[in-house]
Amino acid sequence: MADDAILQVRDLRAGYGPVEILRGVDLDVRAGEIVALLGSNGAGKSTLNNALSGIFRPFGGSIRFMGAEIAGAPAARIVEVGLVQVPEGRRVFPNLSVRENLELGSYRRGRANRARNLERVVGIFPRLAERAGQAAGTLSGGEQQMLAIGRGLMTEPRLLILDEPSLGLSPLLVEEMFALIRRLNADGLAILLVEQNVVQSLAIARRAYVLEHGRIALSGPAAELAGDPALRRSYLGL
């Protein structure tokens, strides 16, 4: 167990109804690092995110965040302590304006600093300032992803889970997205990056886990996983 881990997952089992998807997952995220969680569709990545975020109660195991047990805690409480997920598919409120979507991000956490955080977010994403009064549902896919991340930043997260942030983006926007993730981390934000884009995820992460059939099949420094030909062929399809 890493002494400086802000997120410690031990023997986590989770699923839906009687079906167990995660079968004893161990995972750490330390302060100030990017950790990549890689795996194909159906490996259990979304189930892990849902358990970490309190959307579904895990079957068993431990999730400790900032030293406190949060397994089974309500989602609102998990946001309040600073563990924030930007979900796959953006999930913006399409009929609300860009500004209203951002302001909703500070509903549970960061309300006292809403104006300052809003200024920071539009500084990171100038396009959102240009679209502030526009309905979120009319934005492009890339703009909606900016909005989803911006809304997450409005909560002043201690750990940001990014679930497939590059999904559906053009190659140019994918490059910009990974550059943005690197910049956010350079400012000290810890990030759990859940992705299928193996090459670019390993290029920016410090450590990585490969999830396969509900278990961690591989873990270690990202550079080592990226550089091992046998592992690339066997688990990453490269």
Image (cartoon, rainbow, N blue to C red):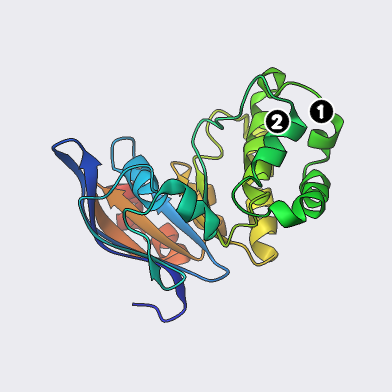
- Residue marked by disc 1: 131
Q: For residue 139, what is the image quadrant?
A: top right
Residue closest to the eye, 208 or 227: 208
Say which quadrant the N terminus sits in. Answer: bottom left
Q: CA separation, marks 1 and 2?
A: 9 Å
**Mark 1 vs 2, N-terminal side:** 1
- Residue 87, horizontal then vertical, whole percent: 50, 39
Residue closest to the eye, 206 or 92: 92
- Residue 120, horizontal then vertical, whole percent: 80, 52
Instruction: Please report contact status of discs 1 and 2: CB closer than 8 Å, yes or no.
Output: yes
Depth-wise, is mark 1 or mark 2 nearer the camera?
1
Task: Check residue 106 in the rendering and tell me which mark sits there, or answer none.
Answer: none
- Residue marked by disc 2: 143
Callout 1 amino acid: Arg
Specify whether 17 is left or right of 181.
left
Badge 2 crowding class, 10 Å Cα cut-off, few under 14, some 14 to 19, many 20 or more, is: some
Callout 2 amino acid: Glu
Dot 2: element: helix
Specify whether 64 is left or right of 190.
left
Residue closest to the eye, 20 or 133: 133
Q: Residue furthest bottom?
A: 3
- Residue 107, horizontal then vertical, whole percent: 63, 45
Dot 1: element: loop
Q: What residue do we see at 55% from left, 28% from top? A: 168
Q: For residue 149, what is the image quadrant?
A: top right
> Can the viewer see residue 47 in this picture?
yes
Q: What residue do we see at 44% from left, 73% from top? A: 5
Say which quadrant the C terminus sits in. Answer: top left
